Amino acid sequence: MSDHAVLHVKGRVLVGPEDVRDELWVVGGRVTYDRPVDPAAETVTVEGWALPGLVDAHCHVGLDAHGPVDAATAEKQALTDREIGALLLRDAGSPSDTRWIDDREDLPKIIRAGRHIARTRRYIRNYAHEIEPDDLVAYVAREARRGDGWVKLVGDWIDREAGDLTACWPREAVEAAIAEAHRLGARVTAHCFAEDSLRDLVEAGIDCIEHATGLTEETIPLFAERGVAIVPTLVNIATFPGLAAGGEKKFPRWSAHMRRLHDRRYDTVRSAYDAGIPVFVGTDAGGSLPHGLVAAEVAELTRAGIPPLAALSATTWGARDWLGRPGLAEGAPADLVVYEADPRQDVRVLAAPRRVVLNGRVVA
């Protein structure tokens, strides 16, 4: 397909959950619903069910289990996401500089949250800025300027003295830090597995919680009232039993806690959804998990009891609206995925895209 060719997508174009059109065209890399008038233009036709490019709202490009990776590895991570149709990624914390990806028309678009900000010796080695509460505001301001409108805190982690998960930050520190991020135009999210950190973070004005396995009957209404989103990363929560087994001997309280959080994971997510809490798709790929798991995460949301259409929206229309990026609107960049069957009827279709179109070009 040449740079001047017109791409014609026909069949069923899912512009929104109920907005279904018969066709669209891609001219100059952008979506249009007006038939092109140039009779000499080369036209390439793709048929099927089209969706906006999928969103992975929690992954880490440029990171693996040991810390930052080289550019070649980061490129492979981004290409793996692209192959499954994940064309918009919210990078929820990375020590790597991946700005060079923005210059690549063939790689997914990334919204960065800067580097994780954690308490000293309270997170995975080589991942985060590890600081004390007095420095939190300054580091949040730094990462707000470095990121793309997001900042990532580590809200809780294992406390080796307590032998269990505990909150990392005092209330007054997170209040000041979140206020500073908002002053600079950035939203704030936090890694949270446990229960104890959630109320302080939400009442301090946080915008999102990652994982959110510690939600309870007491905090779910607070999240719903404040409109705080969650990104459950259920494909990552599936690793909790293995982590618990590995830490059983040294930290039995922590291990038991992790098992409890895992056991009620589906009930937690469904209760959050039923209460009206916004739920979005994220995989946590790039730490210990491989990239390209977005379809598996959508399937996990449906196993938790979220209706298929809502789970689909959590990686397409709803997720793009939440992140402030367009879907298949007139004039939008042509980032879309084409499937053989209707993904609204069976989200497992997402695991086998027929065609992936990025910036108007068929790339997979």
Image (cartoon, rainbow, N blue to C red):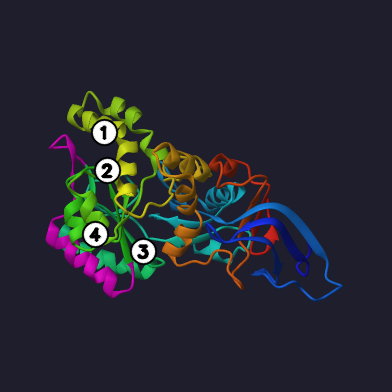
Location of mark 2 (residue): 193
Q: Residues within 10 Å of mark 4 (few under 14, many from 20)?
A: few
Mark 1 vs mark 3, CA separation in Å: 28 Å
Residue 17 in picture, x, y percent from top left: 52, 57
Q: CA distance from mark 3 to mark 2?
A: 20 Å
Q: Tell me the CA gap for discs 3 and 4.
A: 22 Å
Kindly identify the amino acid type of the residue bearing the numbered disc 3: Trp
Q: Nearer the viewer, residue 252 or 189?
A: 189
Res 225 label: 4
Q: Which numbered disc flags the more N-terminal residue, 4 or 1?
A: 4
Q: Earlier in the sequence, mark 2 or mark 4?
A: 2
Mark 3 = which residue? 150
How far apart, in angstroms, are the residues tagged by discs 1 and 2? 8 Å
Q: Callout 2, which amino acid?
A: Phe
Packing grade of label 2 (10 A; few <14, some 14-19, many >=20) is many
Q: Nearer the viewer, mark 4 or mark 1?
A: 4
Check disc 4 and report its element: helix, strand or loop: helix
Magenta segment: 158-186
**Circle 1 is placed at which residue position?**
258
Q: Amino acid at mark 4?
A: Glu
